[in-house]
Structures are given as C-alpha cells and as structure tokens.
Image (tube, helix red, strand yellow):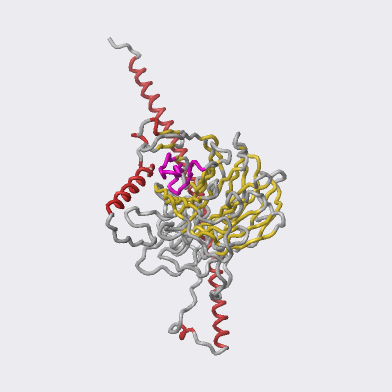
Amino acid sequence: MVPQGAPNTRLNELLEQVRSEFDQEARRAVDYESQLSGQIQEMELVRQKIFQLEQQQLSLKAKYEDDIARLQRELDARGGPSQSSQHHGGPTQPPPPSIGHGPSNLFGGIMAGGAAQGGPGLVPPSQDQPQPQGLPPHMPQGPPGLNPAPGPPQHAPFGGYQPGPPVNGYGQVPQPTASPGGGKPRPRGPPGPATPQQNSAAPYPGSPQVPRPTPPPNHQQHQLSAAAQTSLVQSNTLADLDIESLPDNLKKEGPDWYAVFNPRTRRVLDVDLIHDLCHESVVCCVRFSLDGRFVATGCNRSAQIFEVETGNLVAHLQDGSLPEDGDLYIRSVCFSPDGLYLATGAEDKVIRVWEIATRSIKHQFTGHDQDIYSLDFARNGRIIASGSGDRTVRLWDIQTNSQVLQLSIEEGVTTVAISPDNRFVAAGSLDKSVRVWDATSGHLVERLEGDVGHKDSVYSVAFAPSGDRLVSGSLDKTIKMWELTTPPRMMPGSGPRGGKCIRTFEGHKDFVLSVALTPHGEWVLSGSKDRGVQFWDPVTGVAQLMLQGHKNSVISVAPSPTGGIFATGSGDTRARIWR
C-alpha cells in the first residue's frame, strides 16, 4: 500500500526544481538586459561621434574648396595655367586627407568585438597617397591603443607641400611601401570605432609581400630553421589551447578570467587578480608610480590614481575649466619619478602636469596640432616626451615650462619612450618604423625597419632596463626586440644606424597594442586586441602564459617598477591589477 503523502512530496520536489530553474533564467535575463543596455549606450556614443565627424568633415571640405578657389583666382590673375591644363601637365599636388566616417578613414578602429563596443581611437587619418587599384584595403590607421579616433585632426588649409630641410638627420624622406602607415580600414564590423575583422586565410591586408631569395646550397639548414620557427609560433599561440582539456597545472581560472600556461615549456610563473577597478568609459592607459604604491589610469575626461595595496581611489583629476559636453579621452598618463606629479596627454592637444597633493594643474604645455597619444617622464624628473598624430615628438622642460626639442617624422607618432639613462628618446609610428634620437641634440641615431622590421604600424615601444635593448609592438601582431647599436656618443652629421632585430615574438591572434618589460628585464609583457595578455621569455622567445582577463581589447599593460605586480587597461571599461 502506497503512503498517501508520497505523490505530494514528489510534486513539491518537481515544483521546487521548476522554481529553481525559473530563478536561474531570471538572473540570466537580468544579466543579458544589463549587457544589452551597455551595448546600446556604446552604440549611441558611436552615433554621436560619427555625427560630429560628419560635421567636421563638411567644415574642412568647405575650407579646402574656398582655398582652392582662391588659389585658382590668384593663378588666373597672374596668367598661370588653368585647371584644365594642369591635368595634362606635370605632377599635381597630393589631395587633402580624407576625414570623416567611411571606408577611407580611421573608422576601422582598433577594438572590434562581437557587439557594439565604443571607445576612443588613437591616431588621426594618414595622409597617404590613394590606395592603388587591385590592392586589398589596409587595416586601420588609428593607433595605440584602441579604437578609431573620436575626432579628426584639425588641418590647416591645404596649400601644397613645400620642400623642407632634412628630417632629423634623415636626408631624404623614404618612399612609402605598399602599406603606408595605418592604411585604409576594412568597412566590416557593426561596432563603432571598430577594427575590421581579419581573415586568417588571406595574407595580412596591405602589407608588402617581401620576395624570398633563391635558397643557397645549404638551403636544407634554412628549411630546418624555418620549420623550427613555425613550430615556435604554433607553440606560442596559446589562444588555440583548449582550456577544458588542459591539466590543472597548466591552467588557472577565476570568476571571470583564466590563464593558460605553455605546455611546451616549464611553468615558472603564476597569476592572480588583486583588484578590479571599474571606470565609466574605455580605459586608454595604465601606469605605476616609480615606488609601486600607486597606479594611474586614463579614460574619458579624467585620470584616476588608485592605491595598489587597497585598490582605493585616492585622486580623481579632471580639468573643470573644460566644457562638459563631448568626449575627451586621456590617451596617456605618467608619474614623475618623485611621485609628486602626474602628466596627462589628451585629444585636446594639451599636456597637463598635475600636482597630485593639491589636485591642481602645475604646468600646461601646448604646441601639438593633433591628439597626443603617448607621454613619458625622464628619470631625471625634468623632461617629458610626447608623441602626437601631428607627426612630431616633442620634449618639454617642466623647470623652464617650455618646449626644448621638436622631432618631425613622415607619419603620425603613436608611442614614445625615454631611455633609463635619459640620453635617448624612441618613437613608434604609423609608417612601421621605430626611431631613436639623441635626446639632447635631436640627431636620429637609429631607424629600425626594413625586411626584419614590422610590416604594419608600430603602436608601442619600451626600453629594457639596461637601456641597450628596445621592444616594439605592432598591428602586424608581432613583438620585436631590438639590440641598439648606438655608440657612446653620436658624431654630429652621421646618419642613423640600423639596430639589430634579435628576436620576433609571434603568437598573438590580433594587433599588439601595448608592450613592456618587467623591472629587471626577465619578461616581455604584451597586450592585444585579441583580449589576451602574454608573458614572453626574452631569451628564447617562448610564451610562458596567456591571461584572458578582459572582455575587450587590452589597450595598455604596465608592470610595477618594484616587481611582482602588473596592471591592464581595456576597452571593457576596466583596469585590473594582477600579481
């Protein structure tokens, strides 16, 4: 005989199970709604930015047309050739740069994702020659770090290019290759300042195809070397590892992050999340103070300083004199060596040096004509280097409150770094080159490019602690380590030397946006648009680990100068501190 209460007990169990499943689905719905709301807000920001770019483009177009008409009238008044005759004569002036949204500008961006992901861009549109017919459109023109530029550069009325003096010790401007600077973006993704999706089956769009020489008699050795290199690349592509199939000693998982360790090398590192620092917009940059006690971040309209030990916000730096409307992304931040000041560079072309204790602006440097993308403080605490889309690197003296050096190149500057001994300043550019100058004389002492160089725009450079090596990260998805051959003192008038590329680190699946070295040079650290952070052995070129700790591009990485800790900044509006 079956007890009378048994059916009721079974029914209650089923009802409880249904209630539990309903609660789970309700929580998921709330999460989805929150994600959808965030994406809608980002799409609205992108829409507003596109509208602003349209208005600026129309204004620039009207200025160009007025100037062309005025110049034509002056030419006709002097009895010069008409417009129609110019079409049959000598070379014409290059057209003004394309500005605005569409397939010919910066709106390929750097941060593409599955959903609309807004964020600032990095570099102004390149003023290249038109893309030859038959070549695939190139990747985005805009840099470091992230997405397409939130605003086009303000150019002077176009009046033709005039010959000038040699550019910083380089007698003649080199001819552009098939992929000049940032190139043209692919109009592919729905995300607003978004980076075009890459097709891994095709060669890297727009990059020059370097002819291969005929193999020498010992070509079998070269084939073996190439095979070894291919194997290294495969072993470094840690994003291809299936985390589910990895043993526990080769992976580590957190609530919303995980790390995988290279199974082809001995594991010697560990990683763990210390602090999750939420922001209201894309985090463009992260940087530690020299004593490692604080980390600074730059986002839309403000810079923040957090205490590393607690993760607490200790300073919010925002220029209250600026209008509240519109975006103004802080592209770069850096502490003075004594920790008293924080320098910020932004889209309004102004460098602000904040006195941290009083939260006030101590110095303001103006002179750049376009967005400032990178800053670095010299170890002497006196000089600040800045790089801008206006194709210049500038050095500023905070004691005299003045510009002391201007270095001009052929394309937009995306990144700058000052050597530990204060003697040299390095810069990466849209033209795929890394340059190193004497910081006192302005002589160009190194130009790192060519067959062994990067095949696309360079977005990040960093000196090794020893100062005799340099690492660079590029849109070609690689990191390169260079051995600098600069003599103790450059002879005036001598041309630039070509540094030696001693190692290429391959393994990222997408653009490399930020690179750094740990304090004693034991590891190379990189952040990428593939959302991964990787640690590399600088001696062997082998990747030690890959960290997936963000939901969008990792725009900035920074190791603590005291060691053991590093920070990351991302398009997912978070900065994170890891140990």
Residue 319's x, y, as percent? 67, 52
Residue at image coords 72%, 45%:
358
Query: Is residue 49 in view from this perspective?
Result: no
- The residue closer to the viewer here, 443 or 381, is 443
- Taking 47 as reference, is 15 left or right? left
Check residue 420 for magenta coloring. Answer: no
Quadrant for residue 451, please give it.
bottom left
Residue at image coords 33%, 12%:
4
- Taking 510 as reference, is 409 left or right? right
- The residue closer to the viewer here, 142 or 179, is 179
- The residue closer to the viewer here, 533 or 173, is 173
- The residue closer to the viewer here, 73 or 29, is 73
Query: Is residue 59 in view from this perspective?
Result: yes
Q: Count every numbered label the image shows and give the total.
A: 0
In the displayed structure, 218 sits above or below 493; it is above
Outermost residue on the top side: it is 1
> Which quadrant does the N terminus fall into?
top left
Check residue 522 for magenta coloring. Answer: yes
Residue 226's x, y, as percent? 32, 51
Residue 361's x, y, as percent? 70, 51
Quadrant for residue 140, please give it.
bottom left
- Taking 493 as reference, is 216 left or right? left
In the displayed structure, 412 sits above or below 509; it is below
Write the start and end of the magenta stretch as one range: 521-546
Residue 315's x, y, as percent? 66, 42
In the displayed structure, 550 sits above or below 171; it is above
